[in-house]
Amino acid sequence: MPSSLAQSLTWLKTSGQEHLLSQLQHGIEKEGLRVDQQGQLSQQPHPRGLGSALTHEQITTDYSEALLEFITPVFSQPEQGIEYLADLHRYAYTQLSDEQIWGGSMPGELPPADQIPIAEYGSSNIGQLKHIYRVGLEHRYGRAMQTIAGIHYNFSLPCGFWPLYQQYKGSNTPLQGFQSAAYFALIRNFRRYSWLLLYLFGASPALCSSFMKDKPHNLEQFDDETLYLPWATSLRMSDLGYSNKAQSSLGICFNQLNTYLNSLHQAIHTPHPPYEKIGIKVDGQYRQLNSNILQIENEYYSDIRPKRVIRSGEKPIHALMNRGVEYIEVRNIDINPFLPVGIDAAEADFLNLFLLSCLFMGDDDISAAECGEISENQQRVVNRGREPGLTLTFKGEAIALQDWGIALLEQLSLTAATLDRVNQNTRYSETLAIQKAKLLDSSLTPSAQVLAAMRDQHLSHAAFVMQQSQLHQQTLSASPLNQDLFSTLRSQSEASLQAQAALEAAPAPDFDSFLASYLAN
């Protein structure tokens, strides 16, 4: 019997609807630390020439003041998003004076924790809330965590696809609910198989020893300045990176939208004793927004999230509750230090291929046992993914990583053929071949290449990433930014500063009242 994936692709072809797959929507969010020419974390405020981090839609900051975040518009072709991301880097470099954008996911040498600046967003109530949320992250996880960078890949199908897919599936559920359920099926299959992305694209097998300070760890010494694991793929996604033991009890495995939202709601309103010990407002200064398992829903860290564009003043959880899932956000992508903007079109093509296949691979729920398997598989791959003979677990059975990966690529080849036909090119089959080569030879993976380059050039992790960062600035600067786009971005920056000033000048309640109202909703 044909697989669910094969059946769905056949339906698209025979119904004459394949063309809809040429309208897949993509957007990229990419973080990058500002550092000085010695690779030291910038102590300077967010450059005014980049606008307001609070109100600029395409250039902002994430957790640290030094952690830039670039956000592309939505495009129908991945290469358009990659090029726009390159243009945002080019514009940023015109405003950064003598600073670099760090080209890796894990930071270089870090200063003492109190010298890692927390992002500032001005004096408005919403600006204070964003800052205090990050102060809370400091108290819960430490400031070093706020210097980790990554790439978020946003993906959706065109609106016209969903009524047709609903009809094909024979569902009587209202369209909004059907679409949300289908995206959750995609998410569940993504979680089952996302270890493959960590193997293929993980690019953080090492880190600067200053990141660990005096923390206990199981890393090995690469050189005097660098710690690593010899077979690691993505230490960023390991327990050393973003991991919240308080969140592990939530058991969120994405079976339904309502259970997902209920779990988040419960976590946002459930006190956590260790966080209660921190205190909320101490000596007149906020240490966190509240003492619950999550301060707000964004604190829940997952490798993938269901998303919807929020309206002014709306919380993400309410947007999903009221209007359903609009797109998904993939969050486990490392910055590749060999690429000028950390990602290229071949990787984006594979992400599209992988995510579309996950949508069509079936809609089985994730049991508690499988949820444990998924977590264990991820930890094996991030820490030992290139280890010869490594096995993972699927439905209680051991399976070699290489065998499972090749079997998955065989399934994805069906989708690749469809996308090649629809787009009248061969790039999806080409990226599939590139990824298969990595499964057959782990030395071709970014993580292996990072360690090989460090060894061959006798460089520490920090020195290697700094070298690559300088090279990428030269590469990007060699192709000057289009003058019209430069003018547009400069105007957007100026307008964002004006928008923040207007927000701060407008009448508003005191922050304590604002926060109480915000958290009560």
Image: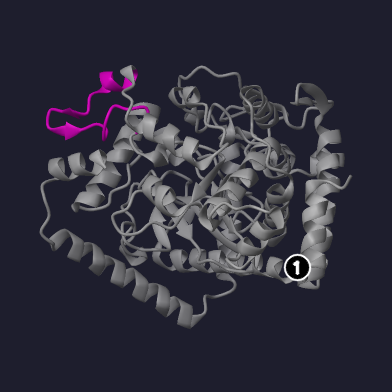
Left or right: 406 as drawn, with respect to 251: right
The residue where tag 1 is placed is 18
Along the line of sight, the residue nearer the viewer: 505 or 70? 505
Q: At 13% across and 62% down in the image, what residue appears?
A: 505
Q: Residue 508: x and y, percent?
A: 12, 55
The quarter in which the N terminus is drawn is top right
Tell me which corner region of the image, top left, top right, bottom left or bottom right, holds residue 78.
bottom right
Q: Which residues are magenta?
A: 274-294
Along the line of sight, the residue nearer the viewer: 168 or 19? 168
Q: Is residue 277 magenta?
A: yes
Q: Residue 210: x and y, percent?
A: 48, 30
Q: Kindly tell me whether residue 475 is visible in this rendering.
A: no
Q: Is residue 254 magenta?
A: no
Q: Is residue 15 above or below residue 287?
A: below
Q: At 75% across and 26% down in the image, what residue appears?
A: 395
The amino acid type found where label 1 is placed reads Glu
The quarter in which the C terminus is drawn is top left
